[in-house]
Image: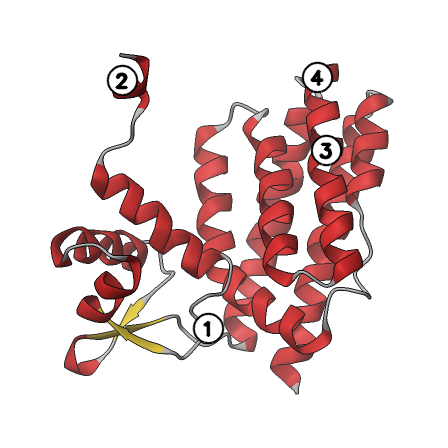
Amino acid sequence: MNQLVTKKPEHETIYLRVRDMILFGEVVPGQPVTIHGLAQAIGTGVTPAREAIRRLTAAGALVSRENRRIEVPDMTAHRLEQIELVRLTVEPALAEAAAKRCKPHDIKELERLDALVDEAIKVGDIRGYLEANYHFHFYLYGLADAQILHRIAETLWLRIGPSLRVVCGRYGTANLVDHHRKATEALWANDPQKTKEAIAQDIRQGMDFVRQTSAD
């Protein structure tokens, strides 16, 4: 009975699968896709695939082109500047709010997720790094209990995720500095300001890497 209650509707499951393809860089910027091609790739019907694409297009993660093609938009310096500005406004604020509500078991879970980030960096697992990094941030942001800011952050990650995948694919993960440990140390110290600063540093690092790639 519980499984029936908690099971997600098919259209939501399909949406999350397509979202993850974009978020973790399975579809790279500029790569065209079709509704039928996407439906075939994930093993679903055209209708739920079309609905997922509609939602992701509304969020700015996809753009429509001629001949019914859809693609992840290329990152431009202007788009990157706007994304960075909003991320550095919204996400550190979420981290600061989360720090005021965080419990010891939450910090332990964040440390577990950070260990997955560290392991992915160590072995050069790009997809593993992107997933663990995402789950670390959004576990933390979820503690803030700020749905509007949380939704904005999710939209921003959809817009920057494919470019982060390109960065990691080009440069690997070995040179990434893990600012998450500073964040968890600040959480143990009950220091919202330092938590906020650590997350801001982490964001700047990612955006700087994307900026370097865009300039190449």
Q: CA distance from mark 1 to mark 2?
A: 35 Å
Rendered-image quadrant of the N terminus: top left
Q: Quadrant of residue 113?
A: top right
Tell me the residue at 22%/39% (across/down).
Answer: 10
| Marked residue nearer the N-terminal end (3 or 2) | 2
Q: Position of residue 20 (x, y in %)?
A: 43, 53
Which marked residue is nearer to the observer: mark 3 or mark 4? 3
Label 1 close to label 4 by CB (< 8 Å): no
Q: Which is nearer the eye, 86 or 45? A: 45
Tell me the residue at 60%/59% (across/down).
Answer: 84
Name the residue that disc number 1 marks.
28
Q: CA distance from mark 1 to mark 4?
A: 36 Å
Q: Quadrant of residue 81?
A: bottom right
Q: Residue furthest left?
A: 47
- Name the secondary structure under disc 4: helix
Name the residue that disc number 2 marks.
5
| Marked residue nearer the N-terminal end (1 or 4) | 1
Which disc, if any, is residue 112? 3
Q: Amino acid at mark 4?
A: His
Q: Which is nearer the eye, 181 or 149? A: 181
Above or below residue 151? Residue 97 is above
Q: CA distance from mark 4 to mark 2?
A: 26 Å
